[in-house]
Image (tube, rainbow, N blue to C red):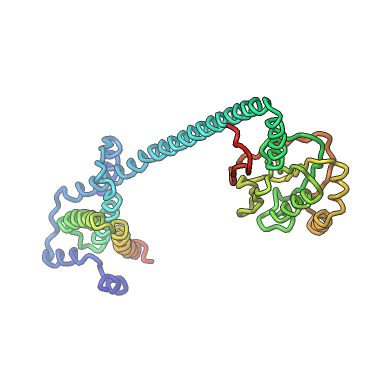
Amino acid sequence: MIALLGLVLGVALGLMLQPDVPLWLQPYLPIAIVAALDAMLGGVRARLEGVFDEKVFVVSFLSNTVIAALIVFLGDQLGVGSQLSTGVVVVLGIRIFSNAAAIRRKLFRA
Amino acid sequence: MSLLADLLGEQALDPGYAAAAARRGNRPPPRRGGMLLVLVLTGVLIAVAAEQVRRSEPVAQQQRSRLIEEVRDRTAATDELQRRLDRLRAETERLRAAALARSDAGRRVREELRRAGEAAAAVPVAGEGLVVTLDDARPPAGEEELGPGAAGLVYDQDLQLLVNGLWAAGAVAVGINGLRLTSTTAIRAAGEAILVDYRPLTPPYRVTALGDRDRLHAAFTGSAAARRLHVIEKRFAIRFEVRRADEVRLPGAGSLRLRHAGEPHGKEVPE
């Protein structure tokens, strides 16, 4: 409940403040979101399995977003930015789907 | 391959939680504001990204309209240059006519020039002639138009056949849909469109031939080209119609290029 509230609050804050994203940061925004989604679903799954740990959640969120952005940044510098972003999205996408499947099994037993 | 192995083994993909739980034992996990903070951050991230996408849309739109604007400007500039070229050509023509009118030799040259200009399709012409119309077959009931590759379409070969037939019948000038043909004008196809002088045409194709209309008509209707076109008309329902006209006009050809020039032999070159 508190988690959902936090998410809604965040969206409202983002829409209200409308911070200007600097141009150099813009390519990393979508990747960071995918990484954040991965961390979030991992947290939900852990919660359902009864092993949720706040420290692990916070650290995994931060490291996920930072590393994903870093990989893309590195790729941009090397000239293979789009390929590396595809790689990151594929890997994180697999994790998201498998976590979502686990959540689904826990919730609906299906 | 460990990622795939994990996936296939249905294991937890983030072993961190399990490790932390094992470390903790049975004590309840400590609660601080960290989770809320992370979720707020995620929300902000999503909102900002969505906002960014929405905001960058008008930028693309602006660039597009700027490009369209530029295209229009350039087209207008080209049109203006074309008008200026036409004016200058008319001026040159007038000055040349005035210069040549001064002497007998000049008048002869002018007459020669006029005939050459007509033959080269450099000057507009008017007079009686034939108008031959070719058109695609009518689309079957219930359809808007014939699809690509349909049997009833007029091809560039049909137009070539018709134009060659008209030249052979003694036409002095030929034009298609208001475009004057020179002896080197190409009639060809690009995709579905027929190009004349590299400009695309839309059906119906109205081919105008200048000349003595009765003689033209007689010579053309008996020709092999007309017979071929009649066969196509019967077999593919292409519309083909020949009409005599009292007064037809054809403009000068758009793209004339000087290909050959030489000094007259044994004569003084006029100053």
**Image position of B106 with respect to B57: above or below:** above
Residue at image coords 63%, 46%: B197
Taking the image as shown, residue A97 lies to the left or right of residue B201, namely left
Q: Is there any visible trace of residue B240 in the rendered image? A: yes
Indicate whether B102 appears above or below B39: above
| Residue at 38% over, 66% down | A110
In the picture, residue B88 is in which quadrant?
top right
Q: From what the image shows, is residue A110 above or below residue A70?
A: below
Q: Is residue A64 left or right of residue B227?
A: left
- Name the residue at 27% across, 70% down: B3
Relative to residue A93, is residue B84 drawn left or right? right
The percent position of residue B153, horizontal first and vertical second, equals: 72, 54
Identified at 81% across, 40% down, the residue is B129
**Where is residue B58 shown, x and y percent of the image?**
40, 37
Q: Is residue B10 left or right of residue B262?
A: left
Front position in the image: B26 or A21:
A21
